[in-house]
Image (cartoon, grey):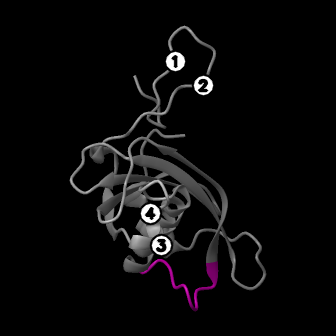
């Protein structure tokens, strides 16, 4: 059985579980991203650093649409303190990517977002990963409690029983 990260336990080994692709059904909301010519690298597929940009794009677009993030005037901003990604299948230009978003953990001032990147219409992730935002005051950069609007926007994305 897969754990919250989608990884299956390694059989007969002390090594960590091997990451596996996740299903479309594992994500409650999606954001569509169109690849760009500049996203491809010399090997003909999207460069790994672009995936992290897509994570930010998908989550922040969702928060803006929900009225939970004002990137210009909001008093609270999210700073990334941790990020990780596993790659399972290549993505390339020209292609449409569908980014699934969920929340694995919501603390007092931090959120662990998990994002799955799917080729358009695919049932399994081409890549999936996470990042953790710590929410701080825009001016003082000190941790702040999650604003109510943010909590309300994230509640439907929270994966029950996750870590």
Q: Real-space Cα distance between discs 3 and 4?
A: 23 Å
Q: Which of the two discs, 4 and 2, labels the residue nearer the N terminus? A: 2
Q: Closer to us: mark 3 or mark 1?
A: 1
* Circle on res. 40: 4
Q: Tell me which numbered mark, 3 or 2, is placed earlier along the sequence.
A: 2
Which mark is drawn over residue 117? none
Q: Is residue 120 above or below residue 152?
A: above
The reply to whether callout 1 and callout 4 are in contact (CB within 8 Å) is no
SS class of the residue under badge 3?
helix
Where does the image place residue 69, in percent across and percent down from the top left?
50, 79
Question: What residue occupies the far top of the structure in this picture?
Answer: 12
Q: Say whether disc 1 or disc 4 marks the residue closer to the N-terminus.
A: 1
Q: Are marks 3 and 4 in contact (CB under 8 Å)?
A: no
Judge the density around disc 2: few (<14), some (14-19), many (≥20) Cα neighbours within 10 Å: few
Disc 4 is placed on an element classified as loop
Name the image quarter holding residue 71: bottom right
In the rendering, which numbered label is found on residue 10?
A: 1
Q: CA distance from mark 3 to mark 2?
A: 31 Å
The numbered dot on residue 60 is: 3
Task: Give left or right: position of 138 versus 124.
Answer: right
Picture coordinates of residue 7, whole percent (x, y): 47, 30
Q: Are marks 1 and 2 in contact (CB under 8 Å)?
A: yes
Secondary structure beneath dot 1 equals: loop
Question: Magenta residues?
Answer: 67-76
Taking the spot 21% from the left edge, 53% from the top edge, the residue there is 121
Name the residue that disc number 2 marks. Answer: 16
**First in residue order: circle 1 vs circle 2:** 1
């Amino acid at each position: 059985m897969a754990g919250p990260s989608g990884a299956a336990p390694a059989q007969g080994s002390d090594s960590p579980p091997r990451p596996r692709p996740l299903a479309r059904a594992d994500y409650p909301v999606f954001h569509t991203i169109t690849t760009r010519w500049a996203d491809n690298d010399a090997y003909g597929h999207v460069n790994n650093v672009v995936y992290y940009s897509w994570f930010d794009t998908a989550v922040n677009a969702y928060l803006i649409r929900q009225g939970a993030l004002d990137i210009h005037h909001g008093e609270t901003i999210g700073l990334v303190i941790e990020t990780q990604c596993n790659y399972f299948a290549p993505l390339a230009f020209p292609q449409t990517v569908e980014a699934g978003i969920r929340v694995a953990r919501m603390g007092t001032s931090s959120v662990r977002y998990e994002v799955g990147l799917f080729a358009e219409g695919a049932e399994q992730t081409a890549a999936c990963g996470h990042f953790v935002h710590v929410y701080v005051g825009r001016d003082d950069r000190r941790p702040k409690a999650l604003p109510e609007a943010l909590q309300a926007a994230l509640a439907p994305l929270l994966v029950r029983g996750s870590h």
